[in-house]
Image (cartoon, rainbow, N blue to C red):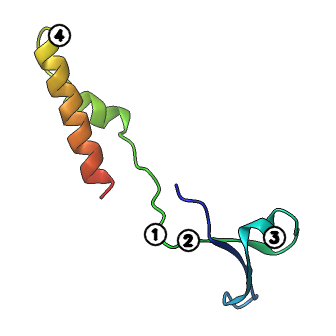
């Protein structure tokens, strides 16, 4: 995740009323608790145990089936995080 470019203070009505530079944030305690970013920050979504089990290949575990499993996991995670 990227570092915030500023930290904001909110009014009770939810509007931003002030912002400070990240260097100031380390020195200033108080209500500057809302990080501001230049890009949307996404939360990583992982697989549930059931989703991972559904992706398991059938039969014997060989290199080929292991690679297929890894690719299936990658595909599923990509679809959940885009």
Of residues 42 and 49, which is closer to you in this image? 42
Which residue lies at the image location 45% right of the left edge and 60% below the top edge?
A: 42
Taking the view exactly as shown, the residue that stands out farthest to the front is 23
Determine whether label 4 and label 3 are within 8 Å by CB.
no
Q: Is residue 24 visible?
A: yes
Q: Is residue 2 left or right of residue 72?
A: right
Judge left or right: residue 23 versus residue 50: right
Task: State left or right for residue 37 relative to residue 77.
Answer: right
The disc, 4 or 1, on the residue closer to the chain's N-terminal end is 1
Q: Where, quadrant-wise, is the C terminus in this rendering?
A: bottom left
Residue under label 2, please give it: 37
Tell me the element at label 2.
loop
Q: Position of residue 3 (x, y in %)?
A: 60, 60
Residue 41 percent coordinates (x, y): 48, 64
Residue 61: mark: 4
Q: Which of pointers 3 and 1 indicates the residue nearer the eye?
A: 3
Q: Nearer the viewer, mark 4 or mark 2?
A: 2
């Amino acid at each position: 995740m990227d570092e915030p470019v500023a930290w904001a203070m909110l009014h009770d009505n939810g509007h931003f009323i002030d912002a400070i530079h990240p260097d100031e944030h380390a020195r200033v305690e108080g209500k500057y608790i809302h990080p501001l970013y230049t890009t949307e920050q996404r939360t990583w979504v992982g697989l549930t145990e059931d989703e991972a089990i559904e992706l398991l290949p059938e039969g014997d575990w060989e290199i080929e089936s292991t690679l297929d499993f890894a690719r299936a996991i990658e595909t599923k995670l990509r679809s959940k995080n885009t």
